[in-house]
Image (spheres, grey):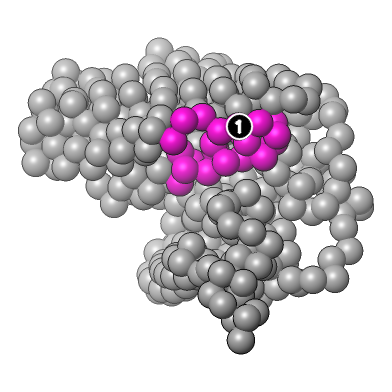
Amino acid sequence: MPLHVVLAGGASLAIGALLPHFSVSLAASRPAPARWRYAGLGLLGFGSLAAVAGFDAEAPAMAVAGGTAFLAGLLVTLATALLPLRAGVGRRPGVIEVGYAVALVNAVAAVCIAALRLGGLVGPAGEWLALKPAHAWLNLLGFLSLVVATTLIHLYPTVLGARIRPSTALLVLVIGIGLGAPLVALGYALGNDSLVRLGAVAVSAGALALTLVALRAWPGRGRWTTDPAWHRLTIGHLSAGIGWLLIGSGVLTVGALAHGADPGGWSINGLVGPLIVGWTLQVLVGSWSHLLPAVGPGGPDRHAAQRRELGRWSIVRLLAWNLGAALISVDALRGGWPGVAGAVLLAGALLVSLTLLLRALLTRGLAASGALHA
């Protein structure tokens, strides 16, 4: 239950909130109507809570209704993300559209699999043992990871201040993760070892492609003379997140090559540290820290104040977050105190990030507050 609240509730809501802003920035176009964005966020929030609460309370009707609302929220979010891209004044970034569309298809498949369990059509044993890893691969890799990785195609060079360079690695990224995850899911559902192994290798190839894209952009990074803490935080979170994706996909691939479609050879515990904490959540923090002062409401003074707020204690926060992810990852192997210590570090870093985000949202800048007129 806590894991689904974090991913279906927290991560999906964050993606739903950030994607429309990123699309507007990328396409230099007008955003989708605000009522659409609010409707998508409302459906995602209500749907995730209703599905989790209904399942926990053994209320299938409530759980299925929540899953249906969540699916509708995904569709609305995709529309609000793609409409600005199609209406932009520049060349339409097709690879990003494909990545988002494939991610949605994977999310729909994951929700449909979950609906079988939420509706009581499959029990906790038997068929669900094979469908559970299929659901996790589609959700965590095919949807969340693909959306985040596709966004980083343009966001990472932008944060670095580097040029965005087209390459075949972008196609490998989208195809590898976008098609590899459903291949693995199909392999688990059919009990086919070859499909599981092939799909896992494809996902790792996609993660490696994203790493190569990041490394290629790094030499052309900007030399910043203002807001060093803010630049350090955003670049640090996104760079570390890409590294954790490579580690997490490697762990998954090793397990898939060793065990094939055997559900007993798969566990979510080993993925919490690298793929959920180190990759998905960390990149979301880095993304909102960059996007709020870049495309959020307000003028230069308010954005400057937001950068100062969001960049506070950047080094300490980066170290705490990634050490926490490492300790949680180690805990999956041996258990004991590393997991507790990692959870404490992560909770502290996340609490500070959310607090500073709230402060940045509330700040009005020097000009707006009247400080310049003193």
Q: Is residue 369 left or right of residue 161?
A: left
On the image, the x and y values in percent for residue 342 come to 46, 69
Residues in magenta, as a range:
14-34
Residue at point 41%, 25% (across, down): 76
Residue at point 54%, 75% (across, down): 369
On the image, the x and y values in percent for residue 84 come to 60, 27
Residue at point 19%, 38% (across, down): 50
Q: How many marks?
A: 1
On the image, the x and y values in percent for residue 66 come to 22, 31
* Main secondary structure found in the magenta portion: helix
- Membership of 29 in magenta stretch: yes
Quadrant assignment for the C terminus: bottom right
**Quadrant of the rendered structure where residue 344 is?**
bottom left
Camera-nearest residue between 315 and 333: 315
On the image, the x and y values in percent for residue 317 come to 57, 72
Residue marked by disc 1: 30
**Quadrant of the rendered structure where residue 83 is?**
top right
Going by the picture, which residue comes out furthest to the right?
219
Q: Is residue 44 visible?
A: no
Q: Is residue 292 visible?
A: yes
Q: Is residue 289 above or below residue 23?
A: below
Residue at point 31%, 38% (across, down): 42
Three-letter amino acid code of the residue under disc 1:
Arg
**Quadrant of the rendered structure where residue 48 is?**
top left
